[in-house]
Every structure is written in C-alpha cells, then in structure tokens.
Amino acid sequence: MIVLGIETSCDETGVAVYDSERGLLGDALYSQVGLHAKYGGVVPELASRDHVRKLLPIITQAIDISKIKKNDITGVAYTAGPGLVGALLVGATAGRCMAWTWGVPAVAVHHMEGHLLAPMLEADPPEFPFLALLVSGGHTLLVEVGRVGDYRVLGDSIDDAVGEAFDKTASLLGLPYPGGPALAALALQGDPARFTFPRPMTNRPGLDFSFSGLKTFAMNVWRDSGQSDQDRADIARAFEDAVVDTMVIKCRRALAATGLKTLVIAGGVGANVRLRQRLRELMEVSDGRVCYPRPEFCTDNGAMIAYAGYRRLQAGQHESLSIKATPRWSLEELSALDTQL
Ligand code: KG4
Ligand code: ZN
C-alpha cells in the first residue's frame, strides 16, 4: 500500500509518501513562518490562502522525491482536524478530490493521532501500550495508549497549551515568532540559579496542566528587571526550567498511576532539547524507555499523516465522498483498531 499524506491544519503545508513495504519514501514541507512573523502569530485567512497556493506544488515535489508515479498511490490521507477550519478545508478538499480522481480510498486523519504515531517512523519504534506526552501549539495532553485508536486522555491543559505559553512568553521578551525555538535557544545563555518560577498545579493531585500563570509571572519579572539581554536570557531559562520540570513531574505521576514503562513524546514542543533530556533521565531511573520522533517530525509534517492514514486504511477504514473538516475533535472519539501491532 502506498499512501499520500497531506497536512494543512495550521501554518505548515506538509506532504509525504509512505509505503507499507519500504517505509517513508519522501516528504516535502513548506512552512508559512515568514508569512505570519510580522503579525506575531498565525493569521487564519492568510494561512488558508497560502495552503491553496502551495499545496499542489508540494504534492508534486513529494511524489517526485519519492520516485513514484501518481498511479502507484493506493490511498490518500488528509488531516481533518483539529485545526483552523479554512486551512483544514484546503487539504481535505484536495485530498478527497484526488483520491476520487485516482479511484483510491481517502481517510480523514486526526492531527494529534498523527503526532502520537510519529515515533513509529523511527528505527526503534515504541511498543504498545505506552504513555504519550503530546505537546504542541494547541495541545498539552497526557494519553494512555493501548493500541492505535485506543486513547484515554489522563491530563489536559485547562488554559494555554504549552507551545502557546512558549510563544506568548517569547513574544513578551521581544523574541520573533515562532517563539518556542527562539526562547529555548536563548535559555542556553541564561543563569538557572537567578530566578525560580512556579511549577503550576504540581502541589495538588491530578494530571492537568495550566501554563497561563507562568506567562504572567514571566511578564512581571521582566517588567521589574533592568530588561537587559542577560535578564532576558535568565527569564527564558527560568521559564523553560519551570515548564520542563512541570511536565516531568506530571509524567512521573502518570507512569506511576498506570504502571506503563514506555513514554512517547511528540508534538512541536517535543523538539525541545531540555525536555527530551529530562524525560530520558526520568525513564532511565525508572528502568523504562523513552521514544520520540526526529525533531522535524515533532513539528507538523506530512509523514505522520501518511503513516497514521496508512494504519487506518490498512484496517479497512475510509471516508465516504464527503469532505471532512472537524476543527474541534477529541482523540477519545477515535475508533480503536483491532491490531495489537
Ligand atoms: O506541533 P506543532 O508544529 O504545531 C501544532 O500542532 O501546534 O507545534 C508548534 C509549537 C509552537 O508553539 C512552537 O513554538 C513549539 O511547538 N516549539 C517549541 C520548540 N520547537 C517548536 N517549543 C519549545 N522548544 C522548542 N525547541
Ligand atoms: Zn501539530
């Protein structure tokens, strides 16, 4: 089975080809970061229009670098949600229509299932069951994963998602969009002993997250500081340490509560080096295993959608001729596949 995967849920146009025999054949990505940077965040209407402009060339590029022909494709997977509705509709319409033209099935993929399964594209993939920490610009989720589609959300964000908190804090420190990678880079020059930020919601039981207070805390410390370059770096370091520490505490709790021994980290914030390192240490001391995708498959991409779509198509799932776009969609609504693999 050769699956074309299409991702257009936010500000990345991603397309990839996954072959059930040979694995990932190729992926192409166009990032709209330059387009949105001057507004300090994603402008939905501009995102939709840019997907319209870029999607077909990116599909051609992905097919070319995969060294296949259009009629080798046996299924199409597109991100149907969650995400920006206009952006989703571009990929969903193109994917559904191409599948119809080529006479192959199309499957609507949940963006977070794509993130969750992305480590399966790596050489030493995780085995089910596992705990997944899904951390992106829109989500902060701790999920107990039994098998593909069997998801129990153990913890969720009650306000800002962790990537959003990174972006907003970076913005108030005057860093360019997208703030997460810029803040993480600056934190490398920060003094970890200078400021101590709170670890939100860790002094009471539970697995939910709240990061909006940290952003306000950072704002107040920045306002009361001399606003020098060193102050900026020290605040970035204190913020990153607080966020990472909070996630480590919640992961430790969730592993203890479920008895799971494998931890998967995925989503854009999963590219954060300090988070990966701290969670690797956590799993080493608890005799467990941590798995994450290569950094470029942590952030949005077509490969994870091609892979998740392949798993669902292989299990016999596909959509009717309607175009599916679901901006709000819980992972728990997905159906579990029979396979344990
Ligand atoms: O998964 P993703 O590409 O898009 C969504 O589905 O939201 O995640 C994007 C988020 C942004 O908030 C970005 O700032 C954050 O991931 N991010 C990072 C890093 N790389 C990306 N946050 C912290 N450290 C990083 N290295
Ligand atoms: Zn994402």
Image (cartoon, rainbow, N blue to C red):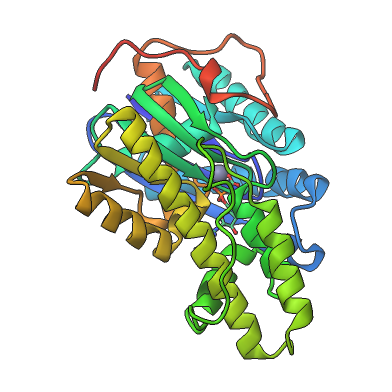
Residue closest to the eye, 234 or 311: 234
In the image, residue 27 lies at what x, y percent? 43, 48
Look at the picture and state if 283 lies above or below 190. above
- When asked about the image quadrant of residue 296, the answer is bottom left
Residue at image coords 34%, 54%: 279
Decide if residue 128 is on the left or right side of residue 15.
left
Look at the picture and state if 12 lies above or below 133. below
Residue closest to the eye, 278 or 329: 278
Visible in this render: residue 172? no
In the image, residue 314 lies at what x, y percent? 34, 17
Residue at image coords 71%, 75%: 221
In the image, residue 75 lies at what x, y percent? 44, 23
The mark tally for this picture is: 0
In the image, residue 284 lies at what x, y percent? 21, 53
Image quarter in which the C terminus is found: top left
Visible in this render: residue 146? yes
Quadrant containing ligand 2 reads: top right
Residue at image coords 59%, 52%: 200
